[in-house]
Image (spheres, coloured by chain):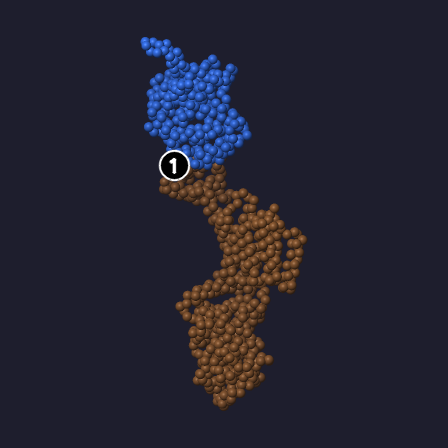
Amino acid sequence: MPAPRLDPLLWLVLVGSVGLLLPHLPVAVLPIVVAAFVWRRLHEVAGLPLPPRWLLLLLAAGSTAVVVLHFHALWGRDAGVALLVVAAGLKLLETHEVRDQVSVLLLTFFLLISVLLFDQAMPIFALVMLLFWLLVGAWMGIAQAGVSTGQSLGQRLREAGRLLLLGLPFALILFALFPRPPGALWGVQQPGGQAQTGLSEQMRPGQFDELAEDPTPAFRVRFEDSPVPPRERYWRVFVMSGFAEDDPESWVADPATGSPRLETLDDSRVAYEITLEPTASRQLPSLAAAVETPRRSRVDGNLVVQREQAVDDRLRYSMTSALDYRLEAGSLPRFRRQQYLARGGLNPLLADLAAEWRDRPPAERIERALAYFREQPFEYSRSPGRRGGADRADTFLFDTQRGYCADYADAFVRLMRAADVPARVVTGYQGGEFNGEFLVVRQSDAHAWAEVWTAADGWQRVDPTAAVAPERIDEGIARSTADDADLPATVRRDEGSFRRQMRLLAEQLDNRWNQYVLGYDGGFQQDWLGRIGLAMTHPVWGALWALAIAASLWWGLLLVLARRERRRQAGSEAEYLWTRLQEDLARLGIRRDTSESERALLKRAALALPFAADDLRRIGQLLEASRYARSTSRRQARLLTNRLANVHRRLAWRGRWPWRRA
Amino acid sequence: MDATICPSIIDRTASVVVGQRPAIRKALTCILAGGHLLIEDLPGLGKTTLAHTLAQVLGLSFKRVQFTADMLPADVVGSSIFQPGVAGAPSGFRFVPGPVFTQMLLADEINRAPPKVQSALLEAMEERQVTVDGKRYPLPAVFFVIATQNPLDQAGTYPLPESQLDRFAMVIRLGYPDAQTEREMLLSGGGRAHLNEVEPVVDVEGLQHLRAQAARVHVADRIAGYVQSLLAASRQAPEFRVGLSPRAGLTLLNLSRAWALIDQRDHVLPDDVQAVLPDLVNHRVGLDGHDGRDAADLLLERVPTP
């Protein structure tokens, strides 16, 4: 005899959550799970017998082995979830009684929640919540199995929705108040390999070409005050002065050094907050010269903000930068000067050009180089095409003269070094697009520029790209390449596009979600609670507080709902108040006998409570009319409720305490 | 004619039947509800006076039958008598109506009559018609029976079984008058002396109108539910030999309506149900007393008032 059918809602959610987990499961697990589902279905529909116990054991052992072979572990998120999926599938094959379905149900709850361990984006969250609702509906079905008056699917879902709504305030309060461990909301260690592609610690001209097509946001910025002008929006990530050992054409990021020798002008400070997508590296993007950095990070000698740990999770941090600053002005130690003059590759033509400027003052040498870029027919292009192998800078400067920011930065720094001016490459992002109050900086905004050192001003930013394509700096990459049909819609800035508008809206929503829900971590919580005067001194106290507040608010809500329910059962406000009045009277010792009519009870009460006698008598008349007469006027009904409420108010606190007897 | 007349009916009757106001009201309730009344009490307490006065006050024709052991049904309902032809008229059987053809009938000591006679009377009460030799003779539109029964003198009697008692809407006892009333009565020589001076308060038409009004008194769902719970409780009570029949339930509602009308109300209250319940229930369930409480008390204790 086939086992009772699985609740249809349970089926739906089970298949749905396994579907959502599918991309994260080892391929070898899939056949087992699918086979289990199909077998169960065939059992229910066609009466195919469920597998014998030994086969189940074999399957369980086999799939565990598969998981271990695949992940080399039984612990951790990925292996754990894979095991959970297998367990749910196999449990289906040994579910005989309706009550066994409860195990499947619980497993499905776990599966559903584990979806969020992989992805917490808003659409996924919404989907998981929807499935959660269906699952609660399935739960009600299983709990009522065998009860003759089971509810229909619609009733169950309505009831489940009601339950979820009832729990919602509790969940929200705990979300807001329950102390969080510092760091990300989901403390699951994510393998570093899953970080977003983005800037890397090496830069080859040409590498940026791919980034130019990537519209995914790199980070979002919210300025505390007015945003900085576009010309100042250089987000520094890496400073590069040396070359890769095996490839003199590749720049390599300098290791973190000591603290900067920095002079800043205080009135040029800007404060801002950045929500950074995972990068798997330790550098945090910052404007100009960071002077105040988030916890567990510091500014190194190159003005790069270095964090203690790599950013494997979305991170939100606040920073303050000075836009006017002088870094290492005056003198540069000899060994460092050598470092910033080192040349990679020969580039003889470049060396010749630079040699002409060597006897001029440094500032003029810089000006000459920029003038060269301006005057020669250079072209700014996202896809410059062919680039030379060795002596690539020569090819670029004197032959193709087409290039992207990295080409310009590379060539400029080499020119400067050849002209005996210390110079280095800085990579990061430039620009960004305002979306509401947030400046969204995308991977396509990745940029490379140069810094040159003069004794008078220290390190100065020079962007050779600006010399060639000033609009790239003023208006961003998209404006400068608006005619390029290959670029994705979000990078191209033709404002009229409907798709683009929708995309922006979605991004705005997504941003809010990231900022306020996923980004609601321990630090944010502390800030926020501090601002409303609830700063927590200790997590345990915080937890107790959160529970107490949640419980009391919830309790209040339940009281209100209970009153509404009693009111609903009583049928009318008057009947409800009449019940309350009888409770008041009973508390005062005037208990209604089973056989006592309203009239008799109220007569007795009027004798015992002379101060309310008139009201009680009138209530008696009105109540009888309302309950037994053919019809009552609206006015009478209102009179009755008023009187009842009035008397209830007067009696409500009587007899509650022994020393206040009526 | 409206319900305000009811108090004067009771007042005038009470001026003759001294000290029996509650019984008078119950009797009037029975009449208005279209039921019949059985008075179970000792002789000499004013049963006849009550019936007679009430008939007078209500302007009804009144007859009295003293039931005895040797009675035949024909003595109550009437019989066909052969009449020889006289003065050209053809001879044949002629129906001579019995005492039952009246508007108010006092059936005295009904338990003395043999069951056949009792049945004939009860049938007439129920059907409001009499069938003799296959011919139906309808009784007057207003037909009200007050039967009496002597509870003590049981030798040679045929006490009415419960199933027959169900035909009476109420069974009441008159009881002795209180000391003051009795003294007044002794001094004045009893109300009976004034019986013939009593003027009717209403006529038959007026009475019918009142009955129609009583039938229109509103019964709220709550009251119907209350009555239903009482019926259910009576059937579940272990102390009762038999539960209340649906007919008893219907009678209970009708009596409550009449009781409410006498109070000049157009809707029934639980108080009305409770007022008429004892006289309706006690003789129907086969329980005279239980720990000093009667059947109605047991029911009212068990069924919560709405």
Relative height, residue B218 to residue B169 (above, below): below
Task: Give the percent coordinates (x, y) of residue B238.
Answer: 55, 30
Between A432 and B239, the residue placed more toward the observer is A432
Task: List x then y, in percent, for residue B190.
Answer: 40, 17
Question: Residue at point 56% right, 62% down?
Answer: A23
Q: Residues within 10 Å of mark 1 (few under 14, many from 20)?
A: some
Q: Nearer the viewer, residue A594 or A395?
A: A395
Residue for point 38% across, 33% down = B266
Which residue lies most toward the right here? A54
Chain shown blue: that is B
* Residue at (33% x, 20% y) in the render: B199
Asked if one can make out residue B277 in the rendered structure from this viewpoint, the answer is no
Q: Is residue A622 left or right of residue A274?
A: left
State left or right for residue A245 relative to residue A419.
right
**Front-lying residue, B246 or A540:** B246
Where residue A300 sits in the image (x, y, percent)? 55, 76
Q: Which residue is mark 1?
A: A630
Classify B257 as above or below A518: above
> Element under label 1?
loop
Residue A313, placed above or below residue A398: above
Circle 1 chain = A
Q: Colour of chain A?
A: brown
Q: Amino acid at mark 1?
A: Arg
State the residue at coordinates (51%, 87%).
A349
Query: Where A334 sits versus B187, above or below?
Result: below
Is residue A347 in view? yes
